[in-house]
Image (cartoon, rainbow, N blue to C red):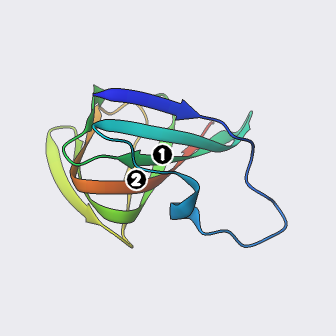
Amino acid sequence: MTAETTDAGAAPLDEAIELAGLVSYGDESVVSRTLLKSKTGTISLFAFDAGQALSEHTVPFDAFVQVLDGCGEFTIADRRHEVRVGQAIILPANIPHAVHAVGRMKMLLTMLRH
């Protein structure tokens, strides 16, 4: 897996945007783009090529994930959840979780710092 990160500037704050169009798929990789970063949290887009994953990890903040394209398998504390386009899931702080793209998948990740 190749991980690519882009920070091509924050999204415009005064106009409607097509979220899924702000990040592109990369062959055999996970591509991310940070839209907004502040002391209270971050909003990032991810594009996973089919079969790509983020291995199990924990973070000290709650995270809200919205699937924008495709389908993903989210494992939270050894419990698997299939999340499809238009659906969302909360990844609780300090609980191990992992992400696996069933096919190509784009998601919006909102991390909330306490």
> Are the residues tagged 1 and 2 within 8 Å (C-beta)?
yes
Residue depicted at x 50% and y 62%: 20
Residue 90: mark: 2
Mark 2 belongs to which amino acid? Ile
Amino acid type of the residue tagged 1 in the rendering: Ala
- Residue 68, compared with residue 112, is above or below; it is below
Q: Which mark is residue 63?
A: 1
Front residue of 17 and 110 = 17
Q: Residue at x 50, y 40 (%)?
A: 32
Q: Tag 2, which secondary structure?
A: strand
Report which quarter residue 11 is drawn in: bottom right
Q: Secondary structure at mark 1?
A: strand
* Mark with earlier residue (1, 2): 1
The crowd level at tag 1 (other Cα within 10 Å; few <14, some 14-19, many 20+) is some
| Residue 61 visible somewhere in the drawing | yes
Disc tally is 2
Q: Residue, x 49% and y 42% (percent of image)?
A: 62
